[in-house]
Image (cartoon, rainbow, N blue to C red):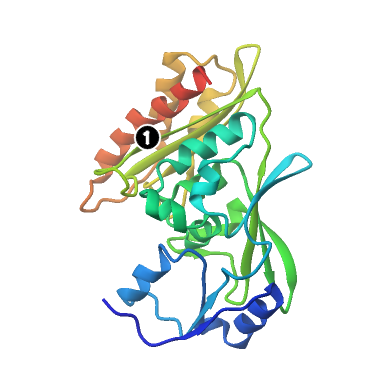
């Protein structure tokens, strides 16, 4: 339960942090909240030679609106997101999703960007990013800034499109208007545990008909799973109980979940069937 020895660096500017990462990118890790990285280091699942603490760098925290997007800076704590003042369906989804993130001490210290970069498919923030086609802004000393679409960012378990010398700066989400309705439903063995299965949904309803639908599911694949079948089942329908059940059945048929000590594939499909109507059901009265 002890990490290997490492060099601790605490830069006070973004340029300094990027310079440190550029020195030895393959043997360096960024430390923000440490709620995922430190346990992995203690179990020696991660063994960086250099730890780059970004907590003293100004400008890496906060939530702001830019045109029709909401931008969440990488070091924004989970609790800041939970207490956000973003109006409408997006703010509601962020608040409800944050309530599922660990326990209060974890939400106080852990960061939004750290969770995204960690890329656990059960992570609520990875699901939200996948659901809303988020855009990640990353930066390196050698190549400057670039934007990565969520569909390209999440590659496999604990693996993203970030290069070893890059730092995730922010995540941009669409500022959903009042035609959108959002929801999340999660099942975990204990409060604060990662969900065995988590479902998220966002639907745009005009004249009582779903015009656009997005469904993303965690715990059924190595990365958040966008269910095209569920989305297609919803578009053109009213949000009736029958439509919700049909969408959940379509999603359950589409996923190919793993089996492990928490539950086999059939169990996870049943959870999809049970949870997706609950996530979508919360949209009806939103």
Q: Please give the name of the residue rendered at 64% of the width and 69% of the height, measured from the top-left corner.
A: 57
Which of the two residues, 15 or 105, is positioned nearer the viewer here? Answer: 105
Residue 262 location (% of width, % of height): 23, 49
Q: Is residue 20 above or below residue 187?
A: below
Q: Please give the name of the residue rendered at 30% of the width and 40% of the height, measured from the top-left corner.
A: 268
Residue 214 appears in the figure: no
Q: Please give the name of the residue rendered at 54% of the width and 14% of the height, measured from the top-left corner.
A: 238
Which of the two residues, 161 or 178, is positioned nearer the viewer here? Answer: 178
Q: Please give the name of the residue rendered at 29% of the width and 79% of the height, measured from the top-left corner.
A: 2
Residue 255 location (% of width, % of height): 39, 41
Q: Is residue 163 left or right of residue 40?
A: right
Residue 24 location (% of width, % of height): 57, 87
| Residue that numbered label 1 is attached to | 252
Instruction: Identify the image quadrant of residue 52.
Output: bottom right
Q: Is residue 2 above or below residue 133?
A: below
Residue 57 appears in the figure: yes
Q: Is residue 71 left or right of residue 126?
A: right
Instruction: Identify the image quadrant of residue 252.
Output: top left
How many neighbours does mark 1 have within 10 angstroms: few (below 14), some (14-19), or many (20 or more)?
A: many
Residue extending farthest right: 67
Residue extending farthest left: 261
- SS category of the residue bearing label 1: helix
Q: Quadrant of the N terminus?
A: bottom left
Number of marks in the rendered image: 1
Residue 283 location (% of width, % of height): 51, 23
């Amino acid at each position: 339960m002890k990490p290997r020895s490492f060099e601790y660096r605490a830069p006070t500017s973004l340029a300094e942090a990027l310079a440190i990462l550029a020195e030895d990118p393959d043997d360096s890790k960024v430390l923000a909240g440490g709620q995922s990285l430190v346990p992995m280091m203690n179990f020696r699942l991660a063994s960086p030679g250099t730890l780059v603490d970004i907590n003293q760098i100004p400008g890496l925290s906060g939530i702001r609106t830019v045109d029709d997007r909401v931008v969440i800076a990488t070091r924004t704590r989970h609790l800041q997101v939970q207490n956000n003042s973003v109006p409408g369906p997006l703010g509601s989804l962020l608040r409800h999703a944050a309530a599922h993130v660990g326990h209060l001490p974890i939400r106080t210290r852990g960061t939004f960007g750290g969770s995204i970069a960690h890329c656990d498919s059960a992570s609520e923030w990875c699901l939200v990013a996948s659901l809303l086609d988020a855009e990640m802004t990353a930066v390196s000393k050698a190549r400057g800034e670039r934007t990565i679409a969520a569909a390209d960012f999440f590659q496999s378990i604990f693996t993203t499109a970030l290069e070893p010398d890059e730092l995730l700066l922010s995540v941009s989400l669409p500022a959903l208007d009042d035609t959108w309705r959002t929801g999340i439903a999660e099942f975990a063995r204990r409060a604060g545990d990662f969900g065995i299965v988590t479902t998220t949904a966002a639907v745009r309803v005009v004249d009582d008909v779903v015009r656009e639908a997005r469904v993303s599911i965690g715990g059924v694949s190595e990365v958040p799973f966008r269910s095209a079948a569920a989305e297609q089942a919803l578009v053109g329908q009213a949000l009736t109980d029958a439509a919700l059940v049909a969408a959940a059945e379509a999603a359950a048929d589409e996923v190919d979940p793993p089996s492990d000590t928490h539950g086999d594939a059939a169990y996870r499909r049943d959870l999809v069937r049970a949870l997706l109507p609950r996530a979508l059901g919360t949209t009806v009265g939103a």
